[in-house]
Image: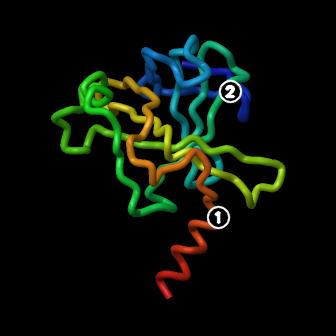
């Protein structure tokens, strides 16, 4: 299918990249249909609204910069996605990235993870019940800390 994207203009997308968010995303509850795309710059992804081309989110797998990240959410959130008995193979977890003018200060929201059932192609944004995870984790700072710990 052909999709109009905010970042890349019109692109051809496989139907299997379509994700339904029955409750939308916080602040965008009325938008429910998205496609998940690889971004031009790795390790980022692009979650593009199918309903409003100007709405899209940059995503990152939290484990890229926080290997200790755990998905600590209400059990009901996983049940809604039919992931309560999943071994993790069908579960995709992302954090929404905010990129300010000064790119070195980009942050990831680990308090509000995006969870997707890969097989059913349904997703939701949840709220972490672990107060370790904040709305703003500075990605480059945390990557630098990882490098320093490895030395």
Horizontal side of 98 relative to 78 (left or right) equals right
Left or right? Give the position of 67 relative to 135. Answer: left
Instruction: Tell me what residue is drawn at x 58 percent, y 45 percent.
Output: 135
Q: Residue at x 48, y 59 (%)?
A: 64
The answer to which image quadrant residue 51 occupies is: top right
Q: How many marks?
A: 2
Q: Quadrant of residue 98?
A: top right
* Label 1 crowd (10 A; few <14 / some 14-19 / many >=20): some
Numbered disc in front, either 2 or 1: 1
Mark sitting on residue 32: none
Q: Position of residue 50 (x, y in %)?
A: 59, 17
Q: Is residue 75 found left or right of 100 in the rendered image?
A: left
Q: Earlier in the sequence, mark 2 or mark 1?
A: 2
Q: Secondary structure at mark 2?
A: strand
> Which residue is identified by label 2?
5
Which mark identifies residue 140? 1
Pick the residue in front: 87 or 134.
Answer: 134
Residue 106 in the figure: left or right of residue 78: right
- The spot of residue 21 in percent (x, y) is 45, 20
Q: Is 83 rendered above or below residue 63?
A: above
- Residue farthest toward the front in the current orientation of the protein: 131
The residue located at (63%, 67%) in the rendering is: 141
Relative image position of residue 109 (x, y in whole percent)? 56, 44
Vertical side of 145 occupied by 61: above or below: above
The extreme left residue here reads: 85
Q: Secondary structure at mark 1?
A: helix
Query: In what quadrant of the picture does the N terminus appear?
Result: top right
Q: How is the image coloured?
A: rainbow
> How many other residues sit within 10 Å of disc 2, few (<14), some (14-19) or many (≥20)?
many
Farthest residue, direction bottom: 151
């Amino acid at each position: 299918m052909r999709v109009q994207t905010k970042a890349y203009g019109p692109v051809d997308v496989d139907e299997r990249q379509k994700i339904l968010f029955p409750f939308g995303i916080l602040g965008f509850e009325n938008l429910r249909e998205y496609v998940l795309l690889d971004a031009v710059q790795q390790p980022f992804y692009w979650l593009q609204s199918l309903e409003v081309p100007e709405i899209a989110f940059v995503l990152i797998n939290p484990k890229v910069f926080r290997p200790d990240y755990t998905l600590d959410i209400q059990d009901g959130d996983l049940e809604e996605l039919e992931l309560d008995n999943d071994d993790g193979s069908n579960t995709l977890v992302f954090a929404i990235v905010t990129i300010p003018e000064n790119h070195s200060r980009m942050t990831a929201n680990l308090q509000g993870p995006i969870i997707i059932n890969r097989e059913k192609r349904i997703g939701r944004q949840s709220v972490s019940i672990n107060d370790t995870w904040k709305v703003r984790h500075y990605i480059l700072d945390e990557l630098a800390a990882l490098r320093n710990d490895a030395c």
